[in-house]
Amino acid sequence: MSTYDHPIDLVYLYVNGNDEEFLAKRSQYAKDQINGVCRIRDNKELMYSLRSVEKYAPWINNIYIVTDSSMPDWLNTDHPKLHIVQNEEIMPSDILPCYNSNVIEAHLWRIPNLSEIFLYANDDMLFCNDVTPDFFVKDGKPLVRMRRQHIGPNSYYFKAIINSRKVLFDYYGKEFDLVPWHNIDVYTKTGMKNCVQEFQKEFNAFFHNRVRKTNDLQRVIFHYYFLSNEACELITHDWTSFVKHFFDYCRMYLFPSRYLDGFFTTTHELFHISLFKRLYMKHPVCACINDSENTTEEDIIKYKNFMETLFPEKSSFEK
């Protein structure tokens, strides 16, 4: 029985990699983006994620899918819990079209009728075990999970995290060595709004980046802001050294019911590194299987077969 009895919504960001019109528009702005194909390739991740919601988290209230593309043919858009939100409904017209997830994510709090506490997921994130609201909420506050990890500015992703750290240091004098756990996250609508308003200059500086740029901020800035204002609780995994990283994997593997709260891998690694598949089969609460530039056609076939084994039954979100 959960101690939190208020509605909790779930928000997805989604693009249909089979939508030719969307791909044509995107190509005008994203020609220089690395790993572009794997970022938008549709392996039916959303379908399996929704199956996992219905199986393991049926208490989730409304589900919002934020998009700038058409929906997949299999999706039951008439489902009463499902709401399709176009980018223009939550973003100013002068920054559209936008193909930068960092920018879009910073506007999620604008979704009409969104619950105060809500979950956010990419379509490649899913539940793999029974979960209650208490996994995400403690004493009425978001229960945030992050990793302690040393990073360098060697990608758009890490550069945006470093930029976000700098904002909190400049305003609050706080230094963070935390990175996202790359899984289903929890936020508050009010907290995100306050963060954007307090750091308005920094957000406005990258809101016109239609694709990822080196001055982006990453959504981790919201969790830094929550922590700085004691507006969330925190659970961490320590990856600051090889030994600590190895220890974390060991305890997740040996004591999954206590420590295996989330798991991240790529489609390629899942079928080429035996430890990762073994961890996955121990049923983490949350998981992310990320498409990557190393993913082969064979990997995709294996992925779909694997998902069908785990989630063989159609959900009510499918036609």
Image: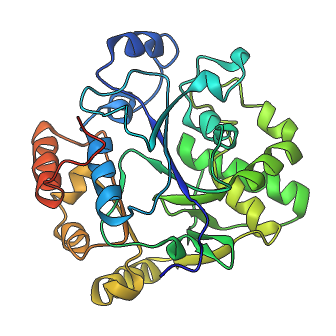
- The answer to whether residue 43 is visible is yes
Q: Which residue is drawn at 63% across and 49% down?
A: 219
* Residue for point 55% across, 45% down: 157
Above/below status of 35 relative to 132: above
Residue shown at 16% from the left, 60% from the top: 310
Chosen colour scheme: rainbow
Give x and y (percent) for residue 181.
Answer: 50, 63
Q: In this view, does 56 lie to the left or right of 271?
A: right
Residue 282, located in which quarter of the rendered image? bottom left
| Quadrant in the picture for residue 208 | top right
Q: Which of 80 and 221 is in front in this view?
A: 80
Question: In front: 200, or 148?
Answer: 200
x, y percentage for residue 257? 34, 86
**Quarter occupied by residue 203:** top right
Quadrant for the C terminus, please.
top left
Is residue 148 something that shows in the picture? no
Using the image as rendered, state which of residue 239 and residue 183 is in the foreground: 183
Q: Is residue 259 above or below residue 70?
A: below
Instruction: Tell me how many marks there are.
Output: 0
Left or right, 179 with reference to 57: right
In the rendered structure, the answer to whether residue 106 lies left or right of residue 98 reads right
Residue 33: image location, x then y, percent: 47, 26
Residue 248 x %, y %: 41, 82
Q: At 78% across and 46% down in the image, what residue appears?
A: 193
